Image: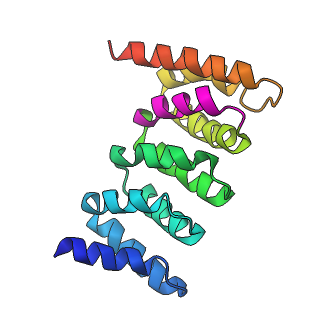
């Protein structure tokens, strides 16, 4: 029964009326964790409106289960979606760092990914000194379009350092 309600709300996220979309999104946020898998599925929608609405909802439900889907949006064609995905990952916290670093090791050529990663790493570095120490070398080169290989290499080093924290 609850999944039928979630499906109905997900359909409303595509409505042409902004008020209907807002109400549906707010209700999904109120439902919380049980709505996350369905919202994550919407992140892959070809419809910009649905991706945006699902991403916006996930910024308010900081669930680690959303990390892979949000990371996949860091290179989205839509800058607003990239920004929201970054906000969602910041909300999840430092658990989002390894997947973002991994994405940079293979996708550093994406300007959108680099910009969104900078946003995430900057904000998380402000909150956590250990994150700052590990991420600073990556942050230092993210804006340099001539350093794609350096970005990927530094992301790889940071990923190794981050994983070493876990023992």
Q: Along the horizontal axis of the image, is 61 left or right of 80? A: left
**Residue 108 on the magenta span:** yes
Residue shown at the point (19%, 73%) measured from the top left: 2
Quadrant location of the C terminus? Answer: top left
The residue lying furthest to the front in this view is 46
Q: Please tell me in which quadrant of the rendered image residue 41 appears.
A: bottom left
Q: Main secondary structure of the magenta part?
A: helix
Residue shown at the point (49%, 84%) measured from the top left: 15
Residue shown at the point (56%, 14%) measured from the top left: 157
The residue lying furthest to the right in this view is 146
Residue shown at the point (45%, 56%) measured from the top left: 59
| Residue range of the region highlighted in magenta in the rendering | 95-109
Q: Please tell me in which quadrant of the rendered image residue 116 appears.
A: top right
* Closest to the observer, 107 or 20: 107
**Residue 54 on the magenta span:** no
Q: Position of residue 139 (x, y in %)?
A: 66, 27
Q: Position of residue 32 (x, y in %)?
A: 29, 62
Q: Position of residue 152 (x, y in %)?
A: 65, 23
Q: Is residue 39 above or below residue 134?
A: below
Q: Along the horizontal axis of the image, is 2 left or right of 155? A: left
- Specify whether residue 30 is in view: yes
- Specify whether residue 133 is in view: no
* Closest to the observer, 1 or 64: 1
């Amino acid at each position: 029964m609850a999944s039928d309600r979630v499906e109905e709300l997900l359909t409303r996220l595509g409505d042409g009326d902004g008020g209907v979309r807002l109400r549906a999104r707010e209700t999904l946020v109120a439902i919380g964790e049980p709505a996350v898998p369905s919202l994550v599925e919407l992140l892959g929608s070809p419809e910009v409106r649905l991706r945006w609405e699902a991403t916006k909802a996930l910024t308010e439900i900081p669930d680690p289960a959303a990390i892979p889907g949000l990371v996949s949006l860091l290179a989205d064609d839509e800058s607003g979606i990239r920004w929201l995905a970054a906000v969602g990952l910041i909300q999840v916290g430092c658990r989002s760092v390894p997947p973002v670093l991994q994405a940079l090791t293979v996708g550093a050529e994406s300007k959108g990914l680099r910009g969104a990663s900078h946003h995430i790493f900057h904000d998380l570095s402000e909150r956590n000194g250990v994150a700052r120490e590990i991420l600073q070398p990556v942050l230092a080169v993210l804006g340099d379009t001539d350093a794609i290989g350096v970005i990927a290499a530094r992301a790889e080093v940071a990923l190794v350092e981050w994983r070493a924290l876990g023992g």
